Image (tube, rainbow, N blue to C red):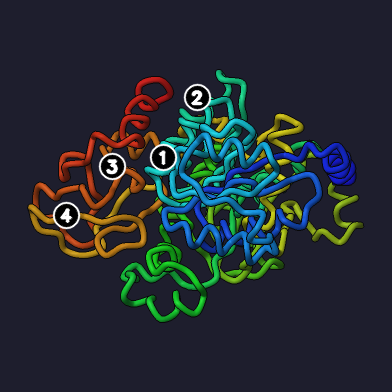
Amino acid sequence: MSSMNKKLVRLAKQDNPIKVAVVGAGKMGKGLVSQMSRIKGMEPSLVINRNGGKALKALLSAGIKKDDIVISNSLKNINFALEKGKYVVSEDMDMAAKANSIQAIVDATGVPEVGAKLSIDAIDNGKHIIMLNVEADSVVGPILHKYAEEAGVIYTGTAGDEPGAVMELYDFAVGLGFEVLAIGKGKNNPINLDANPDTVHEEALKKELKPHMLAGFIDGTNTMIEMTCMANATGFVPDIRGGHGIVSNIDDLTSFFRLKEEGGVLDKYKIVDYVRGIAPGVFLVFTTNLEEIHSQLEYLNMGAGPNYVLYRPYHLTSLETPNTIYDACVNNRATIAPTEGVIADTVTIAKKDLKAGERLDRIGGYTVYGSIEEHTVAKKGNLVPIGLIDENAKVLRDIKKGEFITYDMIQLDTSTNIYKLRMIQEEKIG
C-alpha cells in the first residue's frame, strides 16, 4: 500500500493522474467518485449516468467545482475537455470506452446487459474494466476474462465487494501454504424469498437504494451471485444448492464447517457458502497437515484446530475500488477474476406462480430470484442463469412458485450482448 501511495503522489506531481471513467452514479458510483477525489494521482475524470443530473451531483458532492466540469455527449468535446484537465459528465455510456485519455472504466450499474456491453467495449478499446457489477460477472465473467487476457488488458472484480474481500483472504492463506477448506460471506438478515420492490420500498428510500437492488439483497439473489463469483475465481463449489446459510458466530464457525462425519454440516470441503451472524464480514476456513504448524496456530490463539478461521470484519464496497483501479493500471493485476472458468451459476427460480404469456422482470423484481448451483449440474438440468432474465423474457408455459426455470420454459431475448456472450462462453469454455 505504501508503494501505491508513493507512486500515485509521483503521478500527481507529474500531472499525469490515472484517469477513470465511472459508469453509474447510484450509491456505489457516487461513493467511488467521492473517494477518488481524495486520492492524489487518480481522478474520476468521466462520470456517466443515463440521468446526467445524478452524474453532475456525484462530482459536485465530491467537492469538484462546477467551473471544472463539462457536460457533453460529444466525443470530440469530451476528449478536448479531458486533455485540458476538466471533469466530464455524460449520458452516453459509449463515451467511456471511446474517450482517448481514459485508462480504466468502472461499471457501477449492477445491470447485467450494461456490464456485458461495457466490458466488451472497454476490452475492444484497450481499457481496463473494473466490475462493481457482479450481476454481469457471474454470467459471462469467464469469457470476458478470456477476451481481456487476449487483448492485454485487465478484467477484474473489485476490492471491497465480498468476492474481492474473500479473494484477499484466499490469496493470503494459499500464499502461506495453508489448505483452504471453505470460503464465504456474512449476511445481515434472513433470506425472504418473497421480497420485491413494493415490500422494501420504504426501507430502500431510507438507505438511498433502488428498491430493485434492496429486494435483490433481501431475497438472497445478490448473495448467490457473489458466491458464484467466488466460485469462478477459486474453483470452490456450493456444498448444496443454495448453500447451507447457517447461523453462527466466528468462534463456532469451524464446528459447522467440517465434514458430517466430523460433526459438521458439510458433505465435502473446498466449498463456498454464507453465514448469518457474522455480517458484514467475509471468512475463510483453513487447515494444515503439519503438527508444528498446528502448535504454532494454537500458540497464536487461533483455536485448538484442526480447522481455523480467517475473518475480515468489514468490506467497504466502492470505497476500496481505487485499490483495484491502481492494481489494474499500474501492476497489470486483477483483484479477483474468474480464472477457474465456469464453476457455478446463479440459476433462476419462480418467485410466484407464472402464467404462459406473462413477461418476467429482472433481479430484485416480482417474478424471479436466484440460487447458486454447480455449473455442471445447472447445465445438465438446462437451468437458466438469472442474469439472462429481463423484461423481454416471456413465459411459454405455466410455472409454479418455487420451480426452477429451464430454457424450454421461457423465451429469452437472444439479441442482447449478455445472451450472445453466454452462448459463446458455453461453446468455448463450457
Q: Earlier in the sequence, mark 3 or mark 4?
A: 4
Q: Do callouts 2 and 3 mark residues in contact (Cβ within 8 Å)?
A: no
| Quadrant of image for the C terminus | top left
Q: Residue 92, located in which quarter of the rendered image? A: top left
Q: Tell me the quarter of the picture where residue 148 sits.
A: top right
Q: Which one is earlier in the sequence, the residue at label 4 or at label 2?
A: 2
Residue placed under numbered mark 3 in the picture: 383
Contact (Cβ within 8 Å) of mark 4 with mark 2: no
Q: Give x and y (percent) for residue 29.
A: 56, 56
Of the numbered discs in the image, which one, if any, rests on residue 139?
1
Residue drawn at x 31%, y 43% is 388
Whole-percent x, y for residue 216 in the image: 41, 62
Are the residues at dot 2 and dot 1 in contact (C-beta closer than 8 Å)? Answer: no
At 62% across and 58% down in the image, what residue appears? 317
Residue occupying the point 72% across, 52% down: 307
Query: Residues under labels 4 and 2: Cα distance?
Result: 33 Å
Please tell me which residue lies in front, 224 or 65.
65
Q: Nearer the viewer, mark 4 or mark 2?
A: 2
How far apart are the alpha carbons under marks 2 and 1?
20 Å
Q: Which residue is mark 4?
A: 359
Frontmost of labels 2 and 1 is 2
Q: Of tags 1 and 4, which is closer to the observer?
A: 4
Instruction: Identify residue type, mark 4.
Output: Arg
